[in-house]
Image: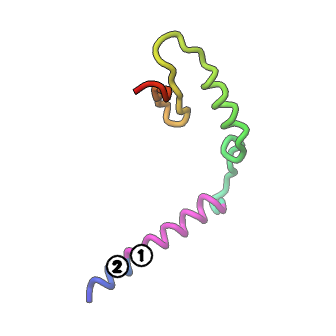
């Protein structure tokens, strides 16, 4: 008996949290605007181009993820 109330309450709380998130973030209920760097892909493409052109002086080639600032070693398909 209590299970249906618990499951219903959890589902309702998730629905309410989702609705609040949509209204605050997407519909800008509290004001504000979306930055140009997020709204267009032009900034992302330029950032990716700059990071890929960044000179490497030693070590294996790496691919940089500019969002998390993590480097990943790039391996070619011929290596085991």
- Tell me: residue 44, above or below residue 64: below
Dots 2 and 1: beta carbons under 8 Å? yes
Please check the rendered image and state whether residue 24 is part of the magenta-colored stretch, yes or no. Answer: yes
Quarter of the rendering containing residue 53? top right
Q: Can residue 65 be found in the magenta stretch?
A: no
Count of labels shown?
Answer: 2
Residue lying furthest bottom: 1
Horizontal side of 42 relative to 52 (left or right) equals right
User: Residue 31, image x and y in percent?
Assistant: 67, 56
Examine the rendering and report whether any part of residue 74 can be seen: no
Whole-percent x, y for residue 39 in the image: 70, 47
**Of the pair 62 and 41, the residue shown nearer to us:** 62
At a point 46% along the width and 14% down the height, the residue shown is: 59
Q: Which residue is mark 1?
A: 11
**Image coordinates for residue 23, horizontal then vertical, percent:** 60, 65
Residue 7: image tag: 2
Hey, which quadrant is residue 47 in on the image? top right
The residue carrying pointer 2 sits among few (fewer than 14), some (14 to 19) or many (20 or more) residues within 10 Å by Cα, namely few
- Residue located 53% across and 28% down the image: 63
Where does the magenta region start and end? 10-27
Image coords of residue 19 (percent x, y): 55, 69
- Looking at the image, what colour scheme do you see? rainbow
Instruction: Indicate whether 48 appears above or below 23.
Output: above
Magenta-highlighted stretch: main secondary structure? helix
* Residue sitting at x 48%, y 73%: 15
The quarter of the picture where the C terminus appears is top left
Q: Answer few, some or many: residues within 10 Å of disc 1's Cα (few below 14, many 20 plus, some between 14 and 19).
A: few
Q: Quadrant of the N terminus?
A: bottom left
- Of residues 23 and 54, the one nearer the viewer is 54
Tell me the element at label 2.
helix
Q: Residue at x 60, y 19 (%)?
A: 54
Q: Name the one closer to the observer, 77 or 53.
A: 77
């Amino acid at each position: 008996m209590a299970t249906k109330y618990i499951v219903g309450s959890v589902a309702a709380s998730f629905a309410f949290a989702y609705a609040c998130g949509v209204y605050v973030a997407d519909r800008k209920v509290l004001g504000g605007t979306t930055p140009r760097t997020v709204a267009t892909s032009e900034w992302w493409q330029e950032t990716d181009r700059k990071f890929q052109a960044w000179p490497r002086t030693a070590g294996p080639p790496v691919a940089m993820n500019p969002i998390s600032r993590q480097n990943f070693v790039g391996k070619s398909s011929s290596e085991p």
